[in-house]
Amino acid sequence: MEITKQTIQRVAEVSRLKLSESELKEFVAEFKEILDVFSKIDEVNTNDVEPSFQPVGLKNVLREDEAEKCLTQERALSQTRHKQDGYFKGPRVI
Amino acid sequence: MRIPEFVQAVKRGEIDIVEHTHKVLDICAHVNSEYHYFTAITQEALQRAKELSRRKEKRGVLWGVPVSAKDAISVMGVETTGGSRILKGYMPLFDATAVEKLRDEGAIIIGKTSQDEFGFGSFGINVGKGYEISLNPFDKRRVCGGSSAGSAGITQKLDTHASLGESTGGSIVNPASFCGVVGLTPTYGRVSRHGLLDYGTSFDKIGPMAKSVEDAAYVLSSISGHDKADATSANIKKEAFHSFVKKDIRGMKMGVIKGSLENADTLVQKGCQEGIRKLEEQGCEIRTIELPITMKYGVSCYYLLATAEASTNLARYCGMRYGTHEELKGDFNSYFSDVRSGHFGKEAKRRIMLGTFARMAGFRDAYYLKAAKIRTLIVNEYKKAFKRVDALVSPTVPKLPLTFDEVKRLSVLENYMFDVLTVGPNVAGIPHMSVPVSMQKGLPVGLMLMTDHFEEGKLVQIGSKAEMQKQ
């Protein structure tokens, strides 16, 4: 597939990264080289093969829905200076 | 002195652990100024040594042993950043389960070790902005390997030491090989990941780096076990892995992975042959095993899946709840993007981008999902091999430790391809270990052994027979 400057720009936006013009140029060239090789996985016949999302055959891991002790609000907020009235304070949304 | 001897000497009162810890911290500070193995040296270690020495009952198998942990592993109250500036100032409010278990056995945490940012590298050179690069303990012009670079380097330099490393695609065995120490990556789920900064959630494993197979086994016995704080940790019986050192290996079958030796540098081949010969002399039968899909598509499969997972895991770093903060300005997209662009290093950006691409609408089926299916084929390929042999063998890394100049000349793709031998066992989640088997031109050569899921005992049993005799 064709990797263009627009593709990389779009990926950067979704990734919440701002790239400089030179980074953008570099990534276009690198992604072309990398994806050219990675695309070869297409050769492998995977008909009737289930995907693995972990390697050791874990099944659904469930626990009882019981309340347990956890971090206090105060401690959870202790690592930030962006807080107000016991909540995290984030940047403007609208 | 190896861990069991050291602990015995401490318990007999022949070693004063306060004095010893003091001495070790001094050595670490000195070594660090030259080799850059630590992101933090913990002065609290002395307090801990004093506290331990006052206790009447001395029960742990790591009593008084100085240990370190890769920076990605949380140590309560000690800055933990995964080697990234975006987490600068983050002080975990709890210990990782593996660290807590080390403490339960009487270990003394002396510091956090240098690494490629979030584990993104094979040479230890992709450190976050503002961090120093670790230098190889045998030759400062060469790299330590990665990403658990500092853990490997300091383990080589200290007399009695073990370190917790972490592997996603080879980050324990690769630096172990380059620094001449033992690195043991357990089965996925054997050791709790609770308190580890995630890279690839379905790949990450915490494991020991040590001066001998037996030392590594003692540490693994201490840190393994089910943990309800990690839903993917395996609920199986704990084992005393160190007891496997004494078991012989007569009649076991070893499979050398086809292409792994032939494509390695001559000196690496020569070194590995020495290790394989030792196994043969102790009664093992050596065969050749083919892993065609793993060897051809393993690197692509690994990078597509692991970066896809990394891109979601690293979404949480946005300068709001912990770590680096900026003044809150602009809307949330612009604030988060500014913080992330300013504080992530280049390789972190590259992997976030690659992973985001692999799971974006329109590309997901061709890359992420296809790679996940190939992962199934790779797991099956190993499972089939372990029906024929007890363990698989290959060089850990196809080359001797590279110089910084050699690494600089590699393209990004060549960098990734360098992991060809280590990604397979990580994709399949099987336990594997790098054992120093030879010195060639003054540089160490590591032999990698792999066994089936949850057969770490067998790995210890075989590895202890291949390791180079200590001077």
Image (tube, rainbow, N blue to C red):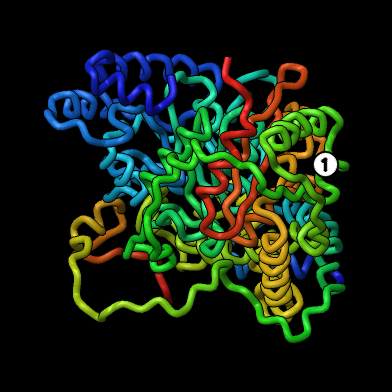
Residue B182 placement: quadrant: top right
Q: Is residue A87 above or below residue B77?
A: below
Q: Answer left or right for B28 relative to A54.
A: left
In terms of depth relative to the viewer, which is nearer, B241 or A21? B241
Q: Element under label 1?
A: loop
- The answer for which chain carries disc 1 is B
List x then y, in percent, for residue B319. Answer: 42, 55
In terms of depth relative to the viewer, which is nearer, A27 or B114? B114
In terms of depth relative to the viewer, which is nearer, B69 or A72? B69
Q: How many marks?
A: 1
| Residue at 43%, 54% in the rendered image | B191
| Residue at 66%, 31% in the rendered image | B178
Q: Is residue B188 visible?
A: yes
- The quarter in which the N terminus of chain B is drawn is top left
For disc 1, the neighbor class at 10 Å (few under 14, some 14 to 19, many from 20) is: many
Q: Is residue B118 visible?
A: no
| Residue at 82%, 51% in the rendered image | B288
- The quarter in which the C terminus of chain B is drawn is top right
List x then y, in percent, for residue B19. Answer: 27, 14
Q: Is residue B71 above or below residue B37?
A: below
Residue B80 placement: quadrant: top left
| Amino acid bearing label 1 | Leu
- Disc 1 marks which residue? B261
| Residue at 59%, 30% in the rendered image | B133
Q: Answer left or right for B379 relative to B149.
A: right
List x then y, in percent, for residue A2. Answer: 86, 71
Q: Is residue A91 above or below residue A47?
A: above
Residue A36 placement: quadrant: bottom right
In terms of depth relative to the viewer, which is nearer, B118 or B336? B118
